[in-house]
Image: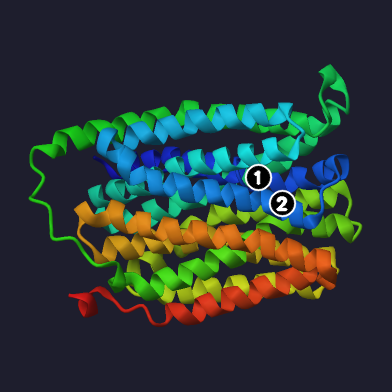
Amino acid sequence: MTAQRVIALALALSLGAALSLGLARFAYALLLPPMREALHWSYALAGLMNTANAAGYLVGALMTPLLLRRWGASQLFVAGAVASCGVMAASAWFEHTSAWLILRALAGVSSAWVFMTGGMLAARLGSVQPARAGLVIALFYAGTGVGITASALGVPASLALLPQGAWGLPGWAWGWLALALGCALCTAVLQWPAREMAARAAQTAATTAAPSAPRRWQELAPGLASYLCFGMGYIGYMTFTVALLREQGASAAQITAYFAVLGLAVMVSGPLWAGLLARHKDGRPALILNGLLAVATALAAASDSWWVMLASGILFGGCFLQVVGSTTALVRHQWPADQWPRGIAWFTIVFAGGQIVGPALVGVIADIGGGLQGGLWVSAGILAVGAALATRQSGPQATR
């Protein structure tokens, strides 16, 4: 397979990350302010919605190894994408709190299937061109920026074009239908890399070596602990910064620009950090990236300036998905190929656990008097702890 084809497949695969995170998870931040006003949600309840999403993500992560025994990664990748389209479309038709908790949980389940299997397929694709493995992994995760930028531009446009009450739907519902359309477009494109990778898996199955001895999760314990902190810290930022900007009086155009630029920063983060992921086989990528995220979150917590928030968004967007990429790269460096799904599953599970705590924590702090900025200070501290823990993750030679 040529280098050009590998990169093209990686870019197509990246729409799985755009769908599962950019559209199905992070776009919620754009719709949170109008939904909170219309449905009379507290910040704690608004954060609980993302906690439900993270709980669903955890369930999906736990289900994935079992489902992979029946279906291949490519099949589950597509099935999760189709399920995400359905959940996003259904989100336009419900207003009751309990229904929304269920919907956000279901979105988490399907997102986990897409994101986990997409990461596995990216790791396998990288093995076709080992010299470009770091770039392939980084490009996959950077695809989330496509979803973030598309939602930043599409959601406000849908709310403006189809006002409150059109076709009997509340104004915010049109945002969810726009996101469902975006998910459907992504699903159509990612059929190609799914078919290609399934065919390649079938071709190589007969020549696959005997399974290696199972590796112990303790070999990755510092990286797992660091990733837990990342999951707790980053999600508060992604859930509440749009609401914070609105509280501070930012205009609709400023909010759209902020979220779109954050997404663009995610998109360019792949090539920016690919060398770091390929070069270092220990915890240094997570140390650097978590440290920068702590700085970006502290900037958002410390200032009321839109320009400072924009700088924070650029720095945050340029780093946060590459922390996820660093875990896939770490597993790829540390463990044999037949153990990659198991290693990625461990990281996904602790990631989901962190995300369960993070949004609810920030929401509670905001409601009891600390404000959203107080919650973000806590998130920044958790990210700094994650950076410190990453220093304890050794390279592969020490785990043999």
Q: Residues within 10 Å of mark 1 (few under 14, many from 20)?
A: many
Q: Is residue 198 above or below residue 138?
A: above
Q: What sort of colour scheme is used for the picture? A: rainbow
Residue positioned 65% across, 45% down in the render:
149
Residue positioned 45% across, 44% down in the render:
60
**Which quadrant would residue 166 be assigned to in this image?**
top right
In the rendered view of the protein, which quadrant contains the N terminus?
A: top left
Q: Is residue 22 above or below residue 390?
A: above
Location of mark 2 (residue): 259
Residue positioned 87% across, 44% down in the render:
37
Q: Are marks 2 and 1 in contact (CB under 8 Å)?
A: yes
Image position of 292 (left or right of 276): right
Q: Is residue 55 above or below residue 71?
A: below
Q: Nearer the viewer, residue 191 or 59?
A: 59
Residue positioned 34% across, 31% down in the render:
75
Q: Assign a secondary structure to mark 2.
A: helix
Q: Position of residue 29 (x, y in %)?
A: 72, 49
Location of mark 1 (residue): 149
